[in-house]
Amino acid sequence: MSNGFTDKLKGAGNKIKGEVKEEIGKNTNDPSLQVEGQRDQLKGETQERVADVKDKITTKIDEYRK
């Protein structure tokens, strides 16, 4: 399992966790929970983008080694 794949999984988990927190915050009228959920979603998106960059770098290194 590549590092990028692991990061993508973590990112997806954080996005889902954030969506749930944000919805709970909306339904319970808890603005701080909504913001926390949005922050988790942003963290997840960032992790997924980092994973994409790692994958691209790994691919370029592998191409260079050939």
Image (cartoon, grey):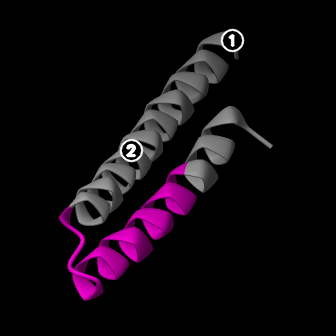
Question: Label 2 crowding class (10 Å Cα cut-off): few <14, some 14-19, many 20+?
Answer: some
Give whichever of 14, 65 is nearer the camera: 14
Question: Bounds of the magenta span?
Answer: 11-31
Task: Identify the residue under disc 1.
Answer: 65
Q: In the visual, does 65 lie left or right of 23? A: right
Task: Pick the quarter of the image with the C terminus.
Answer: top right
Query: Where is residue 37 shown, x and y percent of the image?
Result: 34, 61
On screen, 17 above or below 61? below
The amino acid marked with disc number 2 is Lys
Does 10 appear in magenta?
no
Task: Identify the residue under disc 2.
Answer: 43
Q: Toward which corner of the image does residue 18 lie, by quadrant?
A: bottom left
Query: Where is residue 44 shown, x and y percent of the image?
Result: 43, 50
Q: In the visual, does 36 lie left or right of 53? A: left
In three-dimensional space, the C-alpha distance between marks 1 and 2, rounded to whole angstroms, equals: 33 Å
Give whichever of 48, 27 is nearer the camera: 27
Residue sitting farthest toward the bottom: 27
